[in-house]
Amino acid sequence: MPAQSDWRFCNKCSSMFFNGFPSKGRCPAGRGHVAQGLVFQLPHDTAGTDTAQSDWRFCHKCNAMFFDGFADKGRCPAGFGHEAAGFDFVLSHDIPVAGLNQGEWRFCTKCHTMFFNGSSGKGRCQAGGGHAAAGFHFVLTFQGNLPDPALVPADD
């Protein structure tokens, strides 16, 4: 199954964003997204199933993962609605969380991005306030943690 790596959690807005470009997109909390924690590898361009939803896309304006299955494209921090580019991601939902998977990823009804709903804060939504969860409970596959650059010793 084809998959793309470099998807990350933004520690400012709690959304999933693509971290594989020098530009970090536009974050609703200001400037670019800031990666933290796990590196996700997300499947794309396969058929959806009863437990895997298609129509998740990369927004080329803000770098966030958003649901492209509605006529309304949500609220993009770079202006107006999100604009899809690249792969059609197919994301697992409502399955047991095991192995190299993380649960608590949700669709935001206000901005249409994928955000992490597993902490008390709901991030920063472009439509105002925190994100508002609805729909499926997504379970995403990760590769592992990257070291915190502040904890890596400098070369002598």
Image: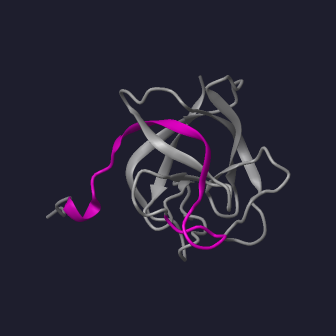
Question: In which quadrant of the rendered image does the C terminus lie?
Answer: bottom left
Which residue is pictured at 16% across the width and 61% down the height? 153
Q: Is 126 located above or below residue 102 in the figure?
A: below
- Residue 103 in sight in this render: yes
Tell whether 34 sits left or right of 138: left
Q: Is residue 150 magenta?
A: yes
Model colouring: one colour
Q: Which of these two is toward me, 70 or 62?
A: 70
Tell whether 16 sits left or right of 107: left
The magenta stretch is 123-151
Quadrant of the rendered image containing residue 48:
top right
Q: Is residue 80 magenta?
A: no
Q: Is 144 located above or below residue 75 in the figure?
A: above
Q: Which of these two is toward me, 63 or 73?
A: 73
Q: Position of residue 151 (x, y in %)?
A: 20, 61
Q: Position of residue 98 (x, y in %)?
A: 38, 27
- Residue 20 in sight in this render: no
Which residue is pictured at 54% across the width and 38% down the height? 138
